Amino acid sequence: QAQLVEAGGGLVQAGESTRLPCAASGRTSSTPAMGWFRQAPGKEREFVASISWSGSSTYYADSVKGQFTISRDNAKNTVYLQMNSLKLEDTAVYYCAGAGTTAQLMGVRGGDYWGQGTQVTVSS
């Protein structure tokens, strides 16, 4: 079993930036691919970004491409989501997820392991 714990989030002004870390522990070898998802009020959870074990491959939802950056530090077992130029519509609960492949994260199955989520609220 792997455990994922998100941090960061909170209230952010529109146009500002914030970074969400997600720390993995336990059987991290079972989750070489990591990703971020979000769920806005009244909407389904959606894929945001994913990254391969090496960090050489990253994928983004069209809605955040050029605005968000996913990265990882394997020495710290931590994946990050840098969010810039935040908009009101970025308000959501953000979830960290782990899986065997980035393809799985972007597919119907999504992650094998999930964090508890962290709220990001963007205010005007």
Image (cartoon, rainbow, N blue to C red):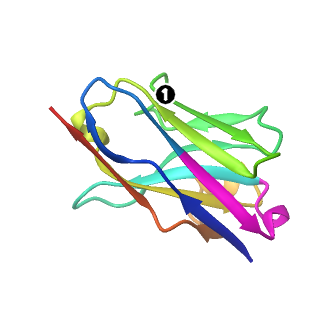
Q: Is residue 122 visible?
A: yes
Farthest residue toward the bottom?
1
Residue 23: give x, y in percent of width and height: 65, 56
Q: Is residue 110 visible?
A: no
- Residue tagged by mark 1? 65
Image quarter of residue 54: top right
Residue 30: give x, y in percent of width and height: 81, 66
Q: Residue at x 22, y 61 (%)?
A: 42
Front in this rendered view, residue 63 or 121: 121
Q: Is residue 17 left or right of residue 88?
A: right
**Secondary structure under the numbered disc 1 in the rendered image:** loop
Q: Residue at x 60, y 41 (%)?
A: 80
Image vertical order of residue 36 relative to residue 97, above or below: above
Front in this rendered view, residue 124 or 76: 76
Q: Is residue 27 left or right of residue 95?
A: right
Image vertical order of residue 102 relative to residue 123, above or below: below
Q: Is residue 38 left or right of residue 54?
A: left
Amino acid type, residue under disc 1 in the picture:
Lys
Image quarter of residue 93: bottom left
Farthest residue toward the left?
124
Residue 26: give x, y in percent of width and height: 77, 71
Q: Residue at x 22, y 36 (%)?
A: 88
Q: Residues within 10 Å of mark 1 (few under 14, many from 20)?
A: few
Residue 19: give x, y in percent of width and height: 49, 37
Magenta residues (range): 21-32
Q: Is residue 23 magenta?
A: yes
Q: Residue at x 69, y 60 (%)?
A: 24
Image quarter of residue 43: bottom left
Front in this rendered view, residue 64 or 118: 118
Front in this rendered view, residue 106 or 24: 24
